[in-house]
Image (cartoon, rainbow, N blue to C red):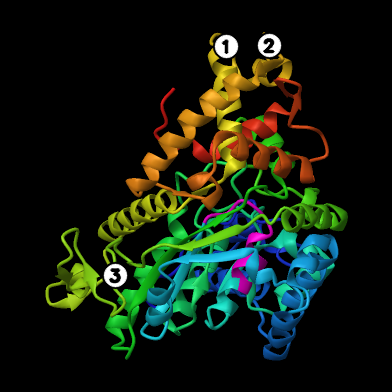
Amino acid sequence: RTDRFFTGVVVTNGAGSPRTGPYANYTDDQMKLVRVEEQREVLAEIIRHFAEEVLGHFSEPMYRIATQIVPVGLNLLLNTLSPLRLFTHFPNGLGKVDDQILIEGHTEEFQQLAKQGTMILVPTHCSNLDSPLIGYVLYRLGLPPFLYGAGLNLFHNKLIGFFMDHLGAYKVDRRKKAPLYKDVLKAYAGYSMELGYHNLFFPGGTRSRSGMVESRLKLGLLGMGLNAYIHNLRSDRPHPDIFVVPCTLNYQLVLEAETLIEDYLKEEGKARYIIEDDEFAQVKRILEFLQGLFSLESRIHVVFSRPLDVFGNPVDAEGRSLDHRGREIDRRKYVVQDGEYRFDPQRDQEYTLELSKSILESFRRDTVIGSVQAVAHVVWRWLRDVNPKMDLYRLLRSGGAQDSLTMTEVYRRLQGTIQALRNLQRREALRLDPELETSDPAAVFGKALAHLKSYHKHPVLERKGDRLFHYDRQLLLYYQNRLSFAELPS
């Protein structure tokens, strides 16, 4: 790249791949090389090997096959697991997986802008199911396939890895900490944007271990949108604009919830980045998860937020950037210095930070809360209230002073929580699943309990007579954490 030369870069901790491992010791090689030309040759070789490892492939025939197989397979599974659904659709045919996936939000703007510029889709991330889900949703919207970075560990799954390797996914090895490797990743993504390829990446960097909605984003890849925009302006490309679309993926249950929260607690909130043995690697667990999803008519909400420019300003369907009063902004002026389009690392970093703030606001506003999260919040809040001096880990292990609470207390607290959530929805601070918009506390509780029983191996909550017993408090914490950003009364 003409705007950056990796001179004097030290590569460390690059091992993790048989092919690039030998090139991780650039520091030692550099010490042995006196001539700058030799150092550059070694550096170029390292960059080439990193780039070849990252490189993704796309097969149009395989894409057509995948978009036909996935809906048919899920439809068959859906109807096999839910006789009630099969009966209710007879004689008009089988039910559709489309009924389970609700696509909401600013979809028309998304579709229009994809014709005018290059899109960067930035979803929330809680499950390895997110990638195939969002890929299928993009197909349903009639959009072309997006380039996206996928963790190298996902390619170890032979079935999933085969499709990902042929559907445009480029490989991201999170075990590599070498600054040069990260620069190669960013350059790959940025240059693809300049060429007009739509991109998808999870700005949180990895799945949310805690169950919380992302509160901090990785700015490296995110900043490549601005980088590509400036390059496009300098090159006078016919369609220079880069648009960013935040997106929330909302499930009642999460496939890998048990593994994720356990990992979060073990590391005291620090992500391990790579989990090799979670539920996504077990076909049986995936089938059990889908069975619970389909049999209970559970909906997955995919919400597309209002599009943004690379500076964090909202964008309308015509591609115009707007200020907070709805007035049009000439976004090109943001990167003009002395009459020319220029890079300015300090300035551009601030612009990317503003973009990340706008994305996080969109994540919170378009998160959909369901019955499981509401009930988990109620029981967890009660546990904290009756054990005010007990630290988190002791409470999780022991369950505190009381092993159950009355259903009267559950309904009383749930009524207050539902009302508070409805008020937040009216203020557009979040979204609610329809069952929380109209149902009474008893119905909401019944739905939540049915969802939890449908998938998780061990009871999370269990009603016995007029009392509710709590068992898997780690999962309670995980599901209630989805509401951690919301301003709910104590």
Quadrant the C terminus occupies: top left
**Amino acid marked by disc 2:** Gln
Q: Is residue 117 above or below residue 391?
A: below
293 and 347: which is toward the camera: 293
Q: Which residue is mark 3?
A: 315
User: Quick one: SS at disc 3?
Assistant: loop
* Dot 1 and dot 3 residues touching (CB under 8 Å): no
96 and 51: which is toward the camera: 96
Q: Residue 424: percent from the left, percent from the top?
A: 38, 42
Residue at image point 79% right, 32% down: 459
455 and 10: which is toward the camera: 455
The answer to whether residue 131 is magenta is: yes
323 and 236: which is toward the camera: 323
- Whichever of callouts 1 and 2 sits on the residue coming sooner in the sequence is 1
Residue at image point 41% right, 79% down: 118
Q: Nearer the viewer, mark 2 or mark 3?
A: 2
Residue stretch rendered in magenta on the structure: 124-136
**Amino acid marked by disc 3:** Val
Q: Is residue 64 above or below residue 409?
A: below
Q: Is residue 3 visible?
A: no
Q: Residue 390: percent from the left, percent from the top?
A: 59, 11
- Whichever of callouts 1 and 3 sits on the residue coming sooner in the sequence is 3
* Dot 2 and dot 3 residues touching (CB under 8 Å): no
Q: CA distance from mark 1 to mark 3?
A: 47 Å
Q: Nearer the viewer, mark 1 or mark 3?
A: 1
Q: CA distance from mark 1 to mark 2?
A: 8 Å
User: Quick one: SS at disc 1?
Assistant: helix
Q: Which residue is mark 2?
A: 402
Residue density around tag 3, few if under 14, some if 14–19, many if 20 or more, within 10 Å = many
Q: Which residue is mark 1?
A: 386
Q: Residue 29: percent from the left, percent from the top?
A: 63, 60
